[in-house]
Structure formats: structure tokens, C-alpha cells
Amino acid sequence: MKIFRKNQAQRFQNGAHCVAFEYPTEDKDINGAAIEISGRYPEKGRAVNRKCKELAFVVKGNGKVVIDGNEQLIEEGDLISIEAGEKFFWMARCACSCLVRQLGTRNSMRWSNRML
């Protein structure tokens, strides 16, 4: 068992409306983060995780997520699954807990989100 403490998390500003706190799991297969979104992320276009699957649990707040053109309203308690290769963006005021399962080599959320 391993425990990753809040004070170990690295803060990344992923644009004007998204802050990520990534935990140093040092595991090539999985990554964990807490995400705060306060508007549109990414600010323009869409993001895509080319090498990983992502699960995001909405801890608080609400908004919408658009995945491959499919718009869904989200709120506290919802779990969102984003498959590798799906293009997405968020328009929300929420806090999410995210787990990212890597497909192949280690590729954290910060590096795998590619803007389109």
C-alpha cells in the first residue's frame, strides 16, 4: 500500500481556468490528480488524451463536459469516463478527482492532454 499526501502534490496551471494538483505516484500505469475548473478548459478547441483513459469524479460544483460533440451536464457525485483518443472540453465550475490509466509508457495528464 502507498499513501500520497496532499503536500506531495505538484501544482500545474493548465490555462486560465484549470489548476491541477498531480500526485507523484511514480507508477507507469496510473496517475492521480485533483482538478479545479473555473470556466472553459481548454480555453480554445478541445483536448485529447492520446495514451491514457481518464476517470473524473465531480467532488463539488457543476457544469458540462463535451466529449466528441456529445454535451453532458455534470454535477456533484457524477463520474465521467474519457477514453483514449476522445476529444473533449469542460465548461464548469467544479472540483474533480481524476484517475488516469496509462496505455503503455508513463504519460501524465499534464503531458498527455493535447490541444486541438
Image (cartoon, rainbow, N blue to C red):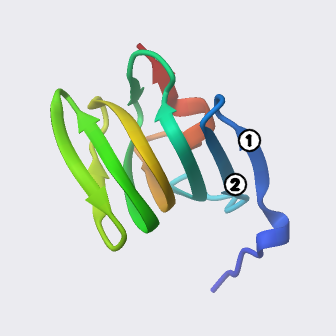
- The answer to whether 85 is drawn above or below residue 9 in the figure is above
Q: Residue 25, located in which quarter of the rendered image?
A: bottom right
In-image side of 11 versus 66 (left or right) = right
Asked whether 87 or 28 is in front, the reply is 87
Label 2: which secondary element: strand
In-image side of 47 versus 27 (left or right) = left
Q: Label 1: which residue?
A: 12
Task: From the top left corner, tell me how far across and down residue 82 is, in percent.
Answer: 29, 45
- The answer to whether 17 is drawn above or below residue 31 in the figure is above
Asked whether 34 or 77 is in front, the reply is 77
**What residue do we see at 59% from left, 52% from top?**
36
- The answer to whether 111 is drawn above or below residue 53 in the figure is above
Task: From the top left corner, tell me how far across and down residue 32 is, in percent.
Answer: 57, 60
The disc label shown at residue 88, or none: none
Task: From the top left corner, tell me how far across and down residue 87 is, in percent.
Answer: 30, 27
Specify which label sits upstream in the sequence, 2 or 1.
Answer: 1
The crowding category of the residue bearing disc 1, from other C-alpha atoms within 10 Å (few below 14, some 14 to 19, many at least 20), is: few
Whether residue 8 is visible to the viewer of this picture, yes or no, is: yes
Q: Label 2: which residue?
A: 21
Three-letter code, disc 1? Phe
In-image side of 62 versus 35 (left or right) = left
- The answer to whether 79 is drawn above or below residue 14 in the figure is below
**What residue do we see at 55% from left, 44% from top?**
38
**What residue do we see at 37% from left, 70% from top?**
76
The crowding category of the residue bearing disc 2, from other C-alpha atoms within 10 Å (few below 14, some 14 to 19, many at least 20), is: many
Q: Quadrant of the C terminus?
A: top left
Three-letter code, disc 2? Phe
Label 1: which secondary element: strand
Tag 2–tag 1 contact (CB < 8 Å): yes
Whether residue 107 is visible to the viewer of this picture, yes or no, is: no
